[in-house]
Amino acid sequence: MKKKLLLIPLALLLAISLVAIGCPATETTTPPTTTPPTTTPPTTTAPPEGPITLVEANWTPAQLPPPIDWEPFDFAINRWMDTIELETDGRVVFERYPTGTLVGMADMYESTKAGICDIGLVNVPVLPDQFPLTNSLRLPGLFQNSTQASVIRQTLLEEGYIANEWKDLKVLWMGGTAPWSLSCREKQVRTMEDLKGLKIANIGEPELSFIGALGAVPVAMPNTEFYMALERGAVDGCWMDTNGQAAFGFYNVSPYLTEIPANGYGSVTWCMNKEKYNSLPPDIKAIFDRNIGILGSLLHGLRFERNTAVAISFLNEREDYPPVYILPPEEEARWLKAGEPLIEATIADLEAQGLPAEAMFERIHELVKIYETWGF
């Protein structure tokens, strides 16, 4: 019994020792007191970000010579860029390269897609195989004025008829030019019979086929080469809208101009590099979005109509040149009748390629009636 009593204190002592070894006592220290600094560190302001610079390129004349005070072939793009710079308070600025100084007409689509320029003017007839449906909108007799030609193109894009042809670029807006007119070096063309055998320059299809259907000899070349060809007598005339005729000064070498009111309308598209557009800050993108689309097409068409009137007035006031001849409705109807087989053949060819040409042309006729109720 005495041995058992002695073992209890020894067991307690051993337990206490083990606890002490496993849990050593920690020494507590009081942290030193620090005096807060009496001066605040200097604040630094991040340098303001510079403006977003966008490079715009087109192939058109920058300005007509005086006394015509308008920008004939910028299709309102300069005014649009001015608006964007103003609404963004200078956060967006544009470097502007007109007259092919950065990118030529033939390279505009690929250059915009690749980012060589951020915004570019694509002339559809340069790439007819790439834009078969869009290019068909240049056929004669589809539209009655530049505003219809512009707004209906944009509507067809937004409704999906031609959207697939433009999927690689951000379309700012689509536009139609003024109606095609015909200038000749040596005589005034007043009837289809006057055209017989004349060599007439144009940029591409379907105008070349239409020129042939009228009895003339179509000659394909870029419109930037028209002036020299006319001056040298390589061609007898050129087929181009009146704005372009005045802008390029063709009246100096091809003074006999015939205006064809319901003829075909050229097709141009203001595009933006898709990645550049998507990289814009949301508030700036919102400013872009409210200034493009149907609004851009509408202003484009109205401006073209105004400029056509100014160009005709200018040409008619020149005492050393004959006045512009406006083709009478009955004669114009003969010209458009000659173009009907071309329209039918184009639709059939597009359908054979699996493209919805019949549906698109039916929609065009509907849209013409709709926009007529709006007064254009």
Image (spheres, rainbow, N blue to C red):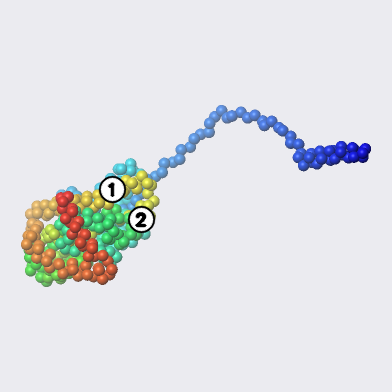
Please name the residue shown 41% across and 41% down the image.
Answer: 48
Q: Which mark is residue 274?
A: 2
Please name the residue shown 36% across and 55% down the image.
Answer: 274
Picture mark count = 2
Q: Which mark is residue 236?
A: none
Between residues 39 and 280, which one lies in front from this camera angle?
A: 280
Question: Crowdedness of circle 2 by 10 Å Cα count: few (<14), some, many (20+)?
Answer: some
Task: Give above or below for 235 relative to 63.
Answer: below
Between residues 162 and 296, which one lies in front from this camera angle?
A: 162
Residue 115 position within the rendered picture, expressed as x and y whole percent measured from the top left: 36, 57
Q: Which amino acid is tagged 2?
A: Lys
Residue 32 position within the rendered picture, expressed as x and y whole percent measured from the top left: 66, 30
Q: Residue furthest right?
A: 2
Give the left or right position of residue 272, taking residue 258 as reference: right
Q: Is residue 57 visible?
A: no
Q: Which mark is residue 291?
A: 1
Answer whether labels 2 and 1 touch (C-beta < 8 Å).
no
For mark 2, give the secondary structure. Answer: helix
Q: Which amino acid is tagged 1?
A: Asn
> In the rendered image, which quarter is residue 143 located in?
bottom left
* Spatial separation of the CA atoms under disc 2 and disc 1: 17 Å
For mark 1, give the secondary structure. Answer: loop
Q: Earlier in the sequence, mark 2 or mark 1?
A: 2
Residue 315 position within the rendered picture, expressed as x and y whole percent measured from the top left: 11, 54
Please name the residue shown 12% across and 64% down the image.
Answer: 336
Please name the residue shown 33% across and 43% down the image.
Answer: 88
